Amino acid sequence: MIVLLIFFFIVDGVASQLHYSVPEEQDHGTFVGNIAEDLGLDITKLSSRKFQIVPSSRTPYLEVNLENGALFVNEKIDREQICKQSATCLLHLEVFLENPLELFRVEIEVMDINDNPPSFPETDITVEITESATPGTRFPVESAFDPDVGTNSLRSYDLTTNNYFYLDVQTQGDGNKFAELVLEKPLDREQQAVHRYVLTAVDGGLPQRTGTALLLVKVLDSNDNVPAFDQSVYSVSMPENAPVGTLVIQLNATDLDEGTNGEVVYSFSSRNSARVRELFNIDPRTGRIEVIGEVDYEESNTHQIYVQGKDLGPNAVPSHCKVLVKLIDVNDNAPEISFSTVTESVSEQAAPGTVIALLSVTDRDSAENGQVHCEILGEVPFKLKSSFKNYYTIVTDGALDRENADSYTITIVAKDKGAPSLATSKSIKVQVSDENDNAPRFLQTIYDVYVTENNVPGAYIYAVSAVDPDIGQNAYISYSILECDIQGMSVFTYVSINSENGYLYALRSFDYEQLKDFSFMVQAQDSGTPELTSNATVNVIIVDQNDNAPSVIAPVGKNGTAREHLPRSAEPGFLVTRIVAMDADDGENARLSYSILKGNELGMFRMDWRTGELRTARRVSGKRDPNHPYNLLIEVRDHGQPPLSSTASVIVTLVDSIVEGHSGERGSSKAKENSLDLTLILIIALGSVSFIFLLAMIVLAIRCQKDKKMSLHTCLNSDCCLCCRTCCSRQARGRKKKLSKSDIMLVQSTNVTSTAQVPVEESGSFNSHHQNQNYCYQTKQRAELSYLVDRPRRVNSSAFQEADIVSSKDSGHGDSEQGDSDHDATNRGHSSGADLFSNCTEECKALGHSDRCWMPSFVSPDGRQGADYRSNLHVPGMDSVPDTEVFDTQEQTGDRSFSTFGKEKSHHGTLERKEFDALLSNTRAPFKPPYLTRKRIC
């Protein structure tokens, strides 16, 4: 076996050609060659590079092992069946690999073996020779046929040795051998009418094969002229696909004899193949050869027709000629497109030049009719590149964007150069696979969300939405809120978002009076790789509700009733008083109107509904009894929906002169009311009071710090009778609590006339370190003690890390339990008002008093101890409204006390008339509460 390796290198990848040879008739599995080794390929990478045969070149006779590249015989190859009489017999395979693309052309030559002996058309060959034939006359003998080629084909003929004939073997121009029987000695029919010889055909193979036939020579009576053709070989040309009946040639043979001996009959020689008899026909009388079948240039471009002419005389001797028919190719075959491999999808981020498909284009025609030009139809981002001979690759020719086009139909048009030109087209569809190249995009960059206050926690408030033009996981969007602080608290305590649909929910009930608006950012994130995000701003605007009733702040009265004086001589329009009210709401909800609800049945007064000024509508009747004052019920109503209102009682007493009572203060106050806002006065006054109180506490802290070194015994026997716990006692607590001012409000509701000793702890700002200070107060007049501690809204605030200054065991909610300070206070025995620590043991006193005895027991003037000190303790709920300023005032008479928290309807305590008038008359004078006057510090 001879193996020839021929390599051809071309542009655009690697392409080469291998040449193998294999004898025919080999068994299945016969090894031909190893394509991978001969090409120098890495056998271990054949599978990963998808080593395979181009489908259009596949043949059933050969097979390739795609794992190791071995080429072997799949089924027996009969060269004579495949290639007929062709001098060379070639089979072709195309194989290719991917990553990178490499195409190889393999040519396998099927070598002929001497597997066929020569054979004659018939086993008996009859030759009729007239007895008048002279020696040297030649008589053609039917030729044998050997399908083998080359040296294995027919080489010579042999004839049985005799005295009358010998064989003359000649070679035609096409290489075929034929034999002629030559007469050596005259024949005598009367002596021997029939001669029998064995005609043997011998080929040139090794070993030689032979074929035999019986040659019968019949001696006839004399017809001494044979027909003669003009030429021994005729050559004609005709186009392929010629219609049936087309004339090929008109033959003519002449015979010098007369009559029937000169009449010639034409016929096809027995040497013609069956295919020639299917395509052509000859008229026996005229010698006209016509087309009777479909002549196809692509099947065979030439045909040889053997014709014999024989006269009708006795002992007729036939003559022979050959007609060579050459077909002319016409452009009757359109190009054929065959795709070897096609990529179903390509990434939208594929680089230009990425291979999409491999295809081949063939045309069965020849010359220009078989020359093909290929192109891609339409404007698509792909192009054709010539790869090897008639092979092409489709590659990307620009950027792809799935969002603009998710698929492309690529149409290949192949057109030959014949006349007329023929074309064919074939289409493939390529999907563009998605890449995460688009970030989610919100429909709005800024969302304004309006939420009415007092909403239900957990209520839906809005929905943000984003879109992503990608698909699949690249377009799956999840929503989240970016971390930020709102009034010192995480945004996650205010709102939440559904990560799947972008629905926003309020996590708390909003209060317009405390928070009018806030902003945060939401983020949309897809699930692609890498993940892409975008942000949008959400502005939450709290819409006010009419949830606060007006609160009357002036005039200040006792028990909610103000007293005003009206001189009998007052003219109509006299300003009696001005009602001042406030509303915590906003807009129309805070616009107030004033009216007289009751007590003005006689029309004595008129009320300005806008300013709240109460004036006389007419003169006071002289018959009016001064002991019967006017009891007016004033209503203040806002303009919300629904409207809310509050009332205030004003008692107008008739006096003879404006000088009576507090006329001096009233005149001074009313002279300034048009120029000074009452609200501003109150704010300044309260600020002054707070500043004085803070200053006093600082002074007390400094004084008591100096006295800390006093012995416990001396302190217990001193006038104050009380020294507060030291810092160490507080640090010794086993459990710490976090309370602030709003947690506990302790109010003394009885008049204390005796000396009261109260422990007080002062703390600085929430960020400063707390220090225990010991204060003792000895009052000489009625003391109104009020402790107000705001309760924190959030128990986890870092601002309240210090321990509870009241009791480490108190629950902070006013409930007593066994062992805590509340329980101890309620179960104390009767003690005198002078000793506030009756439960203290000697050990307790020596240790500076324990948690069980530090709370003072307030004793009423009659000497009875209260059932429970919690009657003076008010603890707001943990979930109360946000911290608000609280006014707590107790009448000096001890009739009633009240406190107000948050946004509940305000009940303001009543200051003494002199104090309120003093506030109105002189804002620069700092307000000094009664309990800060006349005290002694121990």
Image: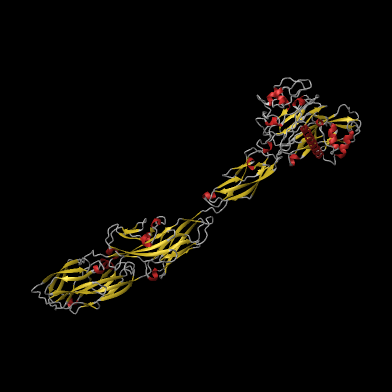
Q: Residue furthest left?
A: 191
Q: Specify the quadrant of the image occupied by residue 890.
A: top right
For residue 368, above or below residue 936: below
Q: Specify the quadrant of the image occupied by residue 711.
A: top right
Relative image position of residue 714 (x, y in whole percent): 77, 26
Relative image position of residue 559 (x, y in whole percent): 79, 29
Color scheme of the displayed model: secondary structure
Viewer-side residue, 814 vs 364: 814
Numbered-mark total: 0
Viewer-side residue, 410 vs 896: 896
Viewer-side residue, 751 vs 264: 751
Q: Quadrant of the C terminus?
A: top right
Residue 900 shown left or right of residue 356 in the figure: right
Residue 582 shown left or right of residue 215 in the figure: right
Could you tell me if residue 191 is visible in this image?
yes
Relative image position of residue 221 (x, y in whole percent): 12, 75
Relative image position of residue 610 (x, y in whole percent): 80, 39
For residue 865, above or below residue 806: above
For residue 672, above or below residue 896: below
Q: Specify the quadrant of the image occupied by residue 151.
A: bottom left
Q: Quadrant of the N terminus?
A: bottom left
